[in-house]
Amino acid sequence: MHAVTDDQRQEATENANLCFFGRRVPNGLPQRHADGLTQRPWARLWMGALVAAILTLQGCASSGPAVRGDNLRGMVLSDAEGRAFMLGDGRGQVRLIHFFATWCFTCLIETPVLEQLSREFAPCGLSIIGVGMDLEGAAVLAPFVQMHGLDFPVLVPNASLREGKSAFGPIRQLPTTFLFDRDGALVERWEGPAEPARLRALVQKVLGDCPADK
């Protein structure tokens, strides 16, 4: 095995700070993905030592921009398979829109949480939508969806969304998650991973009287 250089240590530290500790990044997100940093042996060992700490982290709720579900009408993105998806077609549903990247370690940890919520509460009116911020777009998102067996759509952002000029405003941290109620009002925005128990409780509260086994 080759010795780890100072540049490699710095790169791993910067990437881990971004995902683990919520370091903000500019609108032009760095090009990292699953077959890059997280597949390098020295980085996997370094990250593995922090898994316990990651599981205790939670994102900070933030008011963010005054975005409403109604403001998303007319926003059309393609999913990982190239099909057009109307982001604003969710009136009457509780929508959870999740911005992530395949190279973000805490995003990967949050993925099965969202998948479980989707399977459990979709019959009650919960619509989960992923937006993958990887610069490679569908080339990495399509395999990601297939590998994880996701049953909710994963969309590819357009230029306006990447540049922070959409109704969501700048997405400076990953993961970032928006929860909208059935009327399109923003209930909460998380910057960083949402604490699973709180996320689940809030989803159930917004859905209202809806048994999980409906």
Image (cartoon, helix red, strand yellow):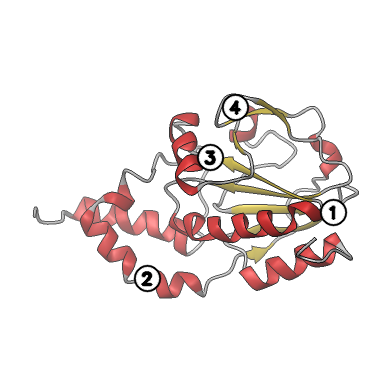
Which label sits in the foreground, 1 or 4? 1
Give the residue pinned by disc 4. 159
The C terminus appears in which quarter of the rendering? bottom right
At 58% from the left and 69% from the top, the residue drawn is 58
Mark 1: few/some/many CA within 10 Å (<14, 14-19, 20+): many
Q: Is residue 39 left or right of residue 156?
A: left
Give the residue pinned by disc 2. 50
Q: Which of the 4 image quarters holds residue 204?
A: bottom right
Helix, strand or loop under label 3: loop
Residue 29 appears in the rendering: no
User: At which x and y percent is residue 196?
Assistant: 62, 68
Disc 1 to disc 4, how far (Cα)? 27 Å
Q: What amino acid is labelled 4 in the image?
A: Ala
Q: Nearer the viewer, residue 124 or 107?
A: 124
Q: Which of the 4 image quarters holds residue 179?
A: bottom right
Disc 1 to disc 3, how far (Cα)? 24 Å
Mark 2: few/some/many CA within 10 Å (<14, 14-19, 20+): few
Q: Nearer the viewer, residue 26 or 206?
A: 206
Label placed on residue 181? 1
At 66% from the left and 28% from the top, the residue drawn is 77
Mark before the other along the chain sequence, 4 or 2: 2
Q: Nearer the viewer, residue 120 or 133?
A: 120
Give the residue pinned by disc 3. 133
Mark before the other along the chain sequence, 1 or 3: 3
Which label sits in the foreground, 3 or 4? 3
Mark before the other along the chain sequence, 3 or 4: 3
